[in-house]
């Protein structure tokens, strides 16, 4: 007979050992956090397939139902979104610097902190569920540490903790807002510069960044109608005539038009900037359109459909071959002529002066889409701006070269950071002005191309905002090539 104790029990002397209870929701949430932390994965990309797999399993094998999946999503997104604030709270409750706490332990602690401070889960349940999770994924020794830290955190509620860790607004406004609204301080500073305005304005923006956006669909004109997409839980878009908002989240993939590529998921801000380019006045020929940074193809698909309706052809360029393939997929079935080229927009594969409308939707920090990527704000660094700066200028410059005289260029970012928006446009216009006899361009007022939208500022460029327009914070400058 074996003398080894049965798995999960201690030898007969001593207290019987209880196996930790496996909670599939929290284990899945922990694994998603680890993937984001270890592999630099994006939560909005790793989580859906994990959930899909878990929903296919039977309950006795750790399968999740719809409520479980919603809880797992809330735990992952909420924990990631408030990561900086939870770190500051956890730091008050451990006796060593956070960098000396093992990352998986920190992930479990953050998950616990979010349940305690950011959900309605009762405190004792949040602690015991997290300690059980720690026993499963970290072992009994570290579970004791987790228990001790969570008990300290549970001594106060979220507002109480904010009182303790934030400096008064009057003393350090940016740090105060950064900790209260869970944004890195440099991001608060940059957003405030771009937005201008009062404490209330910036607070509303930071709050909007912390809300999960509605899923918005685009009915690609000539291929689908908004009527087809307007199910019971959907509403028409606020601004774009092609938009439909799924107010309850919903599953876009369940709609025929989406499966068939006649419609797609696209923020209204992205639709609006593409529409603004398509509707800007152009004299003379209007038959050749170019998208210089097209991957993965959302705006190209809308532009392609609009171009087809007017007898124009679209060339969609993308530097990364795998993203160029995504562009081709998004344009498949487009009723008008289109071509996808794998090309570097700063070393164009087309003749200068050959397009009537050009979109330069350049790579950027993505600080305007923080609602969608809960971890992005903590990953970005101010140095990233310097990395993008030459590329953004090069792409805008070449977009202007690609346009014919009289043609229109849209410079677009999904960041409101002034270093990626106005500074780029101003620099490129200044450098062109220093080259007499060469290419010349002027800014044109973009606001009339976004009819009936309030709060578009003084122009001529436009900055959209989540708290004012319900869109991502897209930036748009429209320029006309004049020589
Ligand atoms: C902001 S995304 C464009 C999003 C796209 N317009 C859409 O709506 O789906 C920028 C794209 O530019 C691509 N890119 C980066 N450098 C480039 C270059 N030098 N030339 C062309 N494309 C580039 C990136 O791979 C990325 O796919």
Image (tube, grey):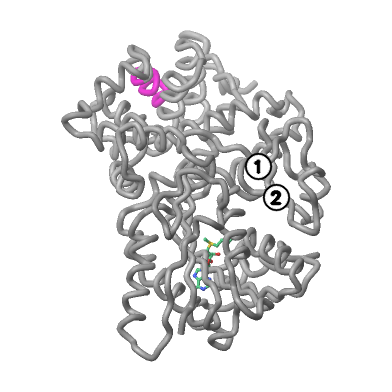
- Circle 2 residue: 242
**Spatial separation of the CA atoms under disc 2 and disc 1:** 7 Å
Magenta run includes residue 268: no
Q: Is residue 317 visible?
A: no
- Across and down, in percent, residue 374 comes to 48, 40
Image quadrant of residue 358? bottom right
- Circle 1 residue: 237
Count of labels in the image: 2
Q: Main secondary structure of the magenta part?
A: helix
- Across and down, in percent, residue 336 comes to 78, 71
Q: Nearer the viewer, residue 240 or 10?
A: 240
Please determine whether, in this image, residue 99 is positioned above or below residue 7.
Answer: below
Instruction: Determine the residue positioned at 32% across, 35% down.
Output: 101
Instruction: Determine the residue positioned at 54% across, 44% down.
Output: 471
Q: Secondary structure at mark 1?
A: loop
Q: Secondary structure at mark 2?
A: loop
Question: Magenta residues, as a range?
Answer: 140-149
- Across and down, in percent, residue 67 comes to 67, 23
Q: Can you tell which mark lies on residue 114?
A: none
Instruction: Determine the residue positioned at 81% across, 67% down.
Output: 335
Q: How packed is label 2: few (under 14 Cα within 10 Å), some, or many (20 or more)? A: many
Instruction: Determine the residue positioned at 65% across, 21% down.
Output: 1
Q: Residue furthest bottom?
A: 437
Please determine whether, in this image, residue 427 is positioned above or below residue 87.
Answer: below
Image quadrant of residue 288? bottom right
Q: Seen in the image, is 265 located left or right of residue 10?
A: right
Q: Nearer the viewer, residue 330 or 25?
A: 330
């Amino acid at each position: 007979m074996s003398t080894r104790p049965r798995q999960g029990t201690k030898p007969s002397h001593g207290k019987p050992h209880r196996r930790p209870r496996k909670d599939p929701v929290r284990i899945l949430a922990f694994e998603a956090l680890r993937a984001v932390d270890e592999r630099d994965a994006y939560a909005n990309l790793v989580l859906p397939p994990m959930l899909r797999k878990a929903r296919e399993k039977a309950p006795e094998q750790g399968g999740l139902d719809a409520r479980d999946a919603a809880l797992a999503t809330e735990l992952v997104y909420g924990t990631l979104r408030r990561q900086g604030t939870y770190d500051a709270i956890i730091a008050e409750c451990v006796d060593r610097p956070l960098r000396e706490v093992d990352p998986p332990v920190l992930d479990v602690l953050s998950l616990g902190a979010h349940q305690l401070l950011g959900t309605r889960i009762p405190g004792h349940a949040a602690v015991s569920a997290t300690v059980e999770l720690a026993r499963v994924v970290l072992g009994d020794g570290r579970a004791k540490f987790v228990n001790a830290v969570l008990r300290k955190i549970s001594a106060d509620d979220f507002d109480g903790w904010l009182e303790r860790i934030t400096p008064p607004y009057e003393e350090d406004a940016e740090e105060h807002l950064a900790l209260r609204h869970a944004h890195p301080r440099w991001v608060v500073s940059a957003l405030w510069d771009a937005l201008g305005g009062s404490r209330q304005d910036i607070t509303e923006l930071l709050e909007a960044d912390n809300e999960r956006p509605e899923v918005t669909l685009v009915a690609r004109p000539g291929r689908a109608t908004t009527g087809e997409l307007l199910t019971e839980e959907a509403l028409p878009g606020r601004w774009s005539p092609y938009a439909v908002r799924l107010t309850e989240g919903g599953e876009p993939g369940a709609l025929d038009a989406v499966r068939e590529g006649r419609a797609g998921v696209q923020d209204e801000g992205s639709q609006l900037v593409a529409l603004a380019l398509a509707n800007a006045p152009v004299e003379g020929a209007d038959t050749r359109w170019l998208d210089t940074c097209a991957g993965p193809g959302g705006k190209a698909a809308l532009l392609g459909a609009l171009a087809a309706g007017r007898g124009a052809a679209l060339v969609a360029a993308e530097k990364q071959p795998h993203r160029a393939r995504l562009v081709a997929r998004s344009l498949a079935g487009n009723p008008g002529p289109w071509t996808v080229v794998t090309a570097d927009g700063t070393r164009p594969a087309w003749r200068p002066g050959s397009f009537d409308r050009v979109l330069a939707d350049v790579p950027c920090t993505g600080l305007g889409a923080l609602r969608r990527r809960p971890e992005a704000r903590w990953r970005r660094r101010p140095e990233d701006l310097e990395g993008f700066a030459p590329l953004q200028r090069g792409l805008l410059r070449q977009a202007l070269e690609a346009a014919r005289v009289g043609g229109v260029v849209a410079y677009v970012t999904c960041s409101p950071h002034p270093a990626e928006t106005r500074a780029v446009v101003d620099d490129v216009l200044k450098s062109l002005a220093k080259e007499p006899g060469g290419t010349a361009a002027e800014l044109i007022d973009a606001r009339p191309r976004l009819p009936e939208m309030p709060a578009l500022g003084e122009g001529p460029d436009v900055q959209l905002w989540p708290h004012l327009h319900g869109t991502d914070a897209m930036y748009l400058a429209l320029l006309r090539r004049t020589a």
